Every structure is written in structure tokens, then in C-alpha cells.
């Protein structure tokens, strides 16, 4: 049973030369080289292609890797560079709870006079006072420090 029934991989001569050059010269991430080798092995333009199990065993990858590379090649419109490169994430996994308004309120709090008995604001003191303010979510002192550092604010 041929491995190219669902998603045949047909490379142009320029794409094939690019992949061969990528796998043999220069310094590239291992995952990129692995995917390039899979594409070269799946290429139907040079003749009959072996089964996916045979290709996977020869290249030292799983059959699932071979299937996913062929699928991604088809999904990217047969764009070789998009197939072998990393897929960039659209959004961060967890949206940040820090907005510009929260940053502004935190900096405004840090600009006020420190409470009685304290000579200046510290990150941990700011953390305690942020917990008392209802409009600002509870922030860790390291998060507060990161926000202040991002805005070049120095506690004095």
C-alpha cells in the first residue's frame, strides 16, 4: 500500500535543492533538519516512495511524525519553509492580568508617601498595599518589580 494516497508530497527542483542543502550544510535546529529529511523521503517527483513505516524506520522517527509532516505540507499550501519551520503561537497560553490601567495605578501608588513607620516603599510593602486596594488584583512582589522595571521606575 503506497504512503502517498491521502497527501502526496511533490517538491520542485528548487525546493528539493534547498532541503538537501539545509540537511547537509550549516547549523540548523535538529527538528528542522528532521522534518526536511522526511519531506525529501516523501517526495514523489523522484520516483516511487516507500511506505511511511519504512521511511520512519530509516530516518529514526515515528510514523506519526511522517504523517504530521505530510499533513502540514498540505495545509501550508506546499510551502517547504513553513512546513519545516516552527509554528508560531497566536496568543500566549494565559492572558496577562496586568493592563495599562493596573500599571498606572501601581506606579501612582509607588509615587505616594510611604506609610508611617517606613522611610520608603519596598516591593514587599507595595505587595501588601496592593492586596488592600480592591481595583488591583493581588500581585506578587516579583511581578510588581517587573512592572516597575519595565517602566524604568526606581523606588527611592
Image: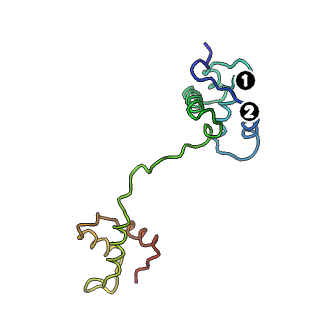
Depth check: 138 or 134 in front?
Answer: 134
Quadrant housing the C terminus: bottom left
- Rendering coords of residue 98 (x, y %): 36, 62
Verify CB contact (< 8 Å) between mark 2 and mark 1. Answer: yes
Q: Nearer the viewer, residue 45 or 121?
A: 45
Q: Earlier in the sequence, mark 2 or mark 1?
A: 2
Determine whether 22 is above or below 116 in the image.
above
Residue that protrudes farthest toward the top in the picture: 1
Please give left or right for residue 139 compared with residue 36 in the image.
Answer: left
Q: Quadrant of residue 23?
A: top right
- Image coloring type: rainbow
Alpha carbons under labels 2 and 1: distance apart: 10 Å
State whether residue 121 appears in this view.
Answer: yes
Quarter holding residue 22: top right
Residue 45 % position (x, y):
72, 23
Density class for disc 1 (Cα within 10 Å; few <14, some 14-19, many ≥20) is some
Say whether residue 31 is visible. no
Q: Secondary structure at mark 1?
A: loop
Which quadrant, please, contains the N terminus? top right
Residue picked out by circle 1: 45
Query: What is the x, y in percent for residue 92?
Result: 44, 51
Rendered image quadrant of residue 121: bottom left
- As drawn, 27 above or below 98: above
Answer few, some or many: residues within 10 Å of disc 2's Cα (few below 14, many 20 plus, some between 14 and 19).
Answer: some
* Image point (33%, 87%), residue name: 119
Residue designated by label 2: 16
Amino acid at each position: 500500500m503506497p504512503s502517498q494516497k491521502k497527501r502526496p508530497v511533490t517538491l520542485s527542483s528548487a525546493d528539493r535543492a534547498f532541503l538537501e542543502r539545509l540537511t547537509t550544510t550549516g547549523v540548523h535546529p535538529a527538528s528542522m533538519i528532521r522534518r526536511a529529511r522526511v519531506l525529501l523521503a516523501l517526495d514523489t517527483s523522484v520516483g516511487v516512495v516507500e511506505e511511511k513505516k519504512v521511511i520512519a524506520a530509516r530516518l529514526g522517527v515515528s510514523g506519526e511524525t511522517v504523517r504530521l509532516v505530510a499533513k502540514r505540507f498540505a495545509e501550508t499550501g506546499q510551502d517547504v519553509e513553513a512546513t519545516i519551520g516552527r509554528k508560531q503561537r497566536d496568543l500566549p497560553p494565559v492572558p496577562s492580568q496586568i493592563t495599562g490601567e493596573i500599571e498606572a495605578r501601581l506606579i501612582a501608588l509607588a509615587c505616594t508617601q510611604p506609610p508611617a513607620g517606613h522611610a520608603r516603599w519596598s516591593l514587599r510593602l507595595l505587595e501588601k498595599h496592593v492586596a488592600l486596594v480592591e481595583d488591583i488584583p493581588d500581585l506578587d512582589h516579583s511581578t510588581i518589580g517587573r512592572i516597575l522595571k519595565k517602566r524604568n521606575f526606581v523606588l527611592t
